[in-house]
Image: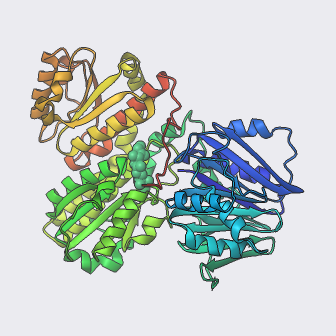
Amino acid sequence: MCGIVGYAGKNEARLVLLEGLKRLEYRGYDSAGIAILGDGIIVKKAVGKIRELESKIDGVNLSGNLGIAHTRWATHGQPSEANAHPHSDCTGKIWVVHNGIIENYQTLKKWLEERGHVFKSETDTEVVPHLLEEFYEGSITKALQRVVKMLQGAYGLAVLHQDEPQKLIAVRYGSPLVIGLGDGETIVASDVSAIIRYTKQVIYLNDGEIAEINSSGLKILDFDFNEINREAQKIEWDVSQAEKNGFSHFMLKEIFEQPKTISDSIRGRLVIKDGKVKLGGLDNVIDKIRSIEKIIIVGCGTARNAGSIGEYMLEEYAGVATEVEYASEFRYRKPVLDNKTAIIAISQSGETADTLAAVKEGKEKNILTLGVVNVVGSTIARTTDAGVYNHIGPEISVASTKAFTSQVAILALITILFGRQRNLSLAVGKRIEEELLILPDKIESITRQSEKIKKIAEKYCHFNNFIYLGRKYNQPVAAEGALKLKEISYIHTEGLPTGEMKHGSISLIDKNFPCLCIAPQDSVYEKNVSNIEEIKARSGKVIAITTEGNDQLNKLVDDVIFIPKTLEMLTPILSVIPLQLFAYHVAALRGCDIDKPRNLAKSVTVE
Ligand code: F6R
């Protein structure tokens, strides 16, 4: 969603803040703004990407050692300079940047207007500086401690007051904030990627904590003025992982990273001789897992698609009843839960509001909650009872790729863990692990086909509708491939279970409505071929993904992409790669802004 960065230290705040905003731009990018406290406060805002803000401040004297900045993804009010952050009170002395939502802002705004406050934006955020003005009596920290008790919703805030020129205040309630402790400088941000260039020592704020940052250091307080001691943690990844390294887009870089990220996800976790896995993050709940009879997987978008593959794996190999739920729906159902149920929450960012709400619902019902999360120290990672990290480094592209394949690989490990506690044999556990080990080379053989897939993309990039079809393990891959194409190219796509097509959607098929059929030589191959015949009989164009060496489809379909053979349960890790590349090339050919698709944000921290 939005990104926040704040700086207090010995260097020019402007440089660190702009650099931080660029790192955070993938989170939201419809407008941006900066406030620097030097000789007075100077504020600049611009609609559009960070480069618009940069050109606006080019030549402006923005000198000062303290500042806050923000990149916005609109929730309340159109993208405009007036709605861009930072926002101010009536005096223009208090400035605030905010990530999240103030749910009761209308009530607060009405109350403030009755007291004479004049609002300049349509945002929910603007109530915060006005409330601070209302309660300010010489200490912005004390004013904030009063104001947070009036706010409902989720927020990460960074605040400046012109009359307290050495102080930067940050507060977290439901929206992530991390503080980097550098050499003579402190940086606060909504995401570590804005910090790693300067320091790897960080402190994650918890909900209900205020950080008071000044030149002599950092003080963490709770909402009742108690001081909290917190050790700094070391970030394990470095700045080069957040760079494009010669690729034209982060998405392409991350697609090509997948041989490595699959290795990183499984490294040190396979005990091949015993057909078992070692997942340290689950050690503390290993006995509880033994008693689990039902699993509910929750996630959103790509993470949910990975979860649907987990459902097939866990039922087939671990024999545990599993269902997959849209995280955004979970709390509106009345799921039947008992102490033999576990939730597995899947989230790359670990901050997705809907997934977090599902986890909290599970905790409320006192059931075991497990996480499959990439971002270390993120809210979902810390809220779940136990979990497994992906260890794939930062995923910057808004369209998720390497997180998906890693999530599927981790779900395979979890399946082995659950399975070996139940009826899965040593031999089958071992077989899955041996196959996981050689997947990276197989992925590489697909990424090497990028140019061939680009040629296919050239043939199809002008179509405005696509159907993606897959069965069994590849049914969620069809959904994922369709999601990838639609989100970055704005082409209308549908991802369906192949067998569903004849129950209605087949009426769409004609020569202008191509189908992407995932049909590896697996247990449902013959059935897929029959469905492809049905499409061809209606003059539909078909691109098929099938197994290397299968020359049967060449004659039937328009284009074929080959993937190496693997275990049926692991095919999604391979079959999704051509779909990621196809989506990438189509979007590139259509001139789309691939890493920053319109209307989207990387981590959706609002409901
Ligand atoms: C699609 C995409 C989204 C995310 C979803 C969940 O490419 O990235 O669908 O998968 O917003 O995000 P996380 O995994 O961070 O919870």
* Percent coordinates x, y for residue 27 in the rendering: 55, 48
Residue 24 coordinates in the image, percent (x, y): 60, 49
The answer to which of 335 and 438 lies nearer the viewer is: 335
Q: How far across and down, in percent of the image, does residue 90 sit?
A: 74, 56
Q: Where in the figure is residue 281, as x and y percent of width and height? A: 39, 72
Asked if residue 420 is positioned above or below residue 433 in the image, the reply reads below
> In screen coordinates, is 49 left or right of 298?
right
Quarter of image, res 493: top left
Q: Is any part of residue 510 visible from this angle?
A: yes
The answer to whether residue 169 is left or right of residue 277 is: right
In the image: residue 602, left or right of residue 280: right
- Residue sitting at 18 percent across and 14 percent down? 539
Residue positioned 70% across, 76% down in the render = 142
Q: Is residue 433 above or below residue 585?
A: below
Q: In this view, does 472 lie to the left or right of 114?
A: left
What residue occupies the far front of the structure in this picture?
Answer: 114
Q: Residue at x 45, y 27 (%)?
A: 587
Q: Residue furthest right?
A: 39
* Quadrant in which residue 194 is drawn: bottom right
Which one is in front, 399 or 32? 32
Query: Looking at the image, which residue sits at the far bottom?
Result: 226
Residue drawn at point x = 46 percent, y = 55 percent: 606
Image quadrant where one finds the C terminus: bottom left
